Amino acid sequence: MNNQGQMMLFGLMLMIFIFAVVVILISPMKEVVSNFRENYHCSETNLSINDRALCTLVDMYLPYFIVTLLIGSAVYLFYRTITAV
């Protein structure tokens, strides 16, 4: 196997590893977000604008975390494929 094939295989293995880490971290992160929402009383209707913004930011954390890591691993794979000599 030539150098480009080795780099592509290494990038693919790294992408699979990052995907596995993301899948493993989903459950603990959901629990952290849920605990925050319960302790900060985000379900109440009489929150200030700052509290609503904070609750919204925490709610959006998990999807953005997942998407960012998956896109990052895909970009790394394609970058290593293009730059491998």
Image: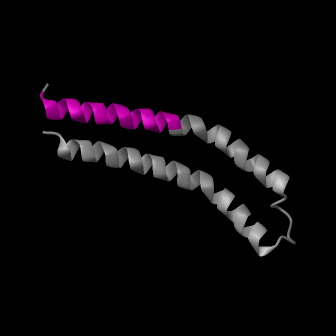
Q: Is residue 42 left or right of residue 74?
A: right
Q: Residue placed at 78% from the left, 47% from the top?
A: 35
Outermost residue, front side: 50
Give above or below for 31 relative to 17: below
Q: Is residue 41 magenta?
A: no
Q: What is the total number of numbered labels drawn onto the structure image?
A: 0
Give above or below for 34 relative to 23: below
Asked which colour scheme the image uses, the reply is one colour
Q: Residue placed at 86% from the left, 65% from the top?
A: 44
Outermost residue, bottom side: 49
Quadrant containing the N terminus is top left
Residue 12 locus on image (x, y percent): 32, 35
Q: Residue placed at 26% from the left, 31% from the top?
A: 9
Q: Is residue 17 magenta?
A: yes
Give above or below for 2 relative to 76: above
Residue 50 occupies quadrant: bottom right
Residue 14 locus on image (x, y percent): 37, 34
The chief SS type of the magenta part is helix
Residue 49 locus on image (x, y percent): 76, 74
Residue 18 locus on image (x, y percent): 44, 37
Quadrant containing the C terminus is top left
Q: Is residue 12 left or right of residue 6?
A: right
Q: Which residues are magenta?
A: 2-21
Q: Is residue 43 left or right of residue 59?
A: right
Give above or below for 66 relative to 28: below
Q: Residue placed at 71% from the left, 68% from the top?
A: 53
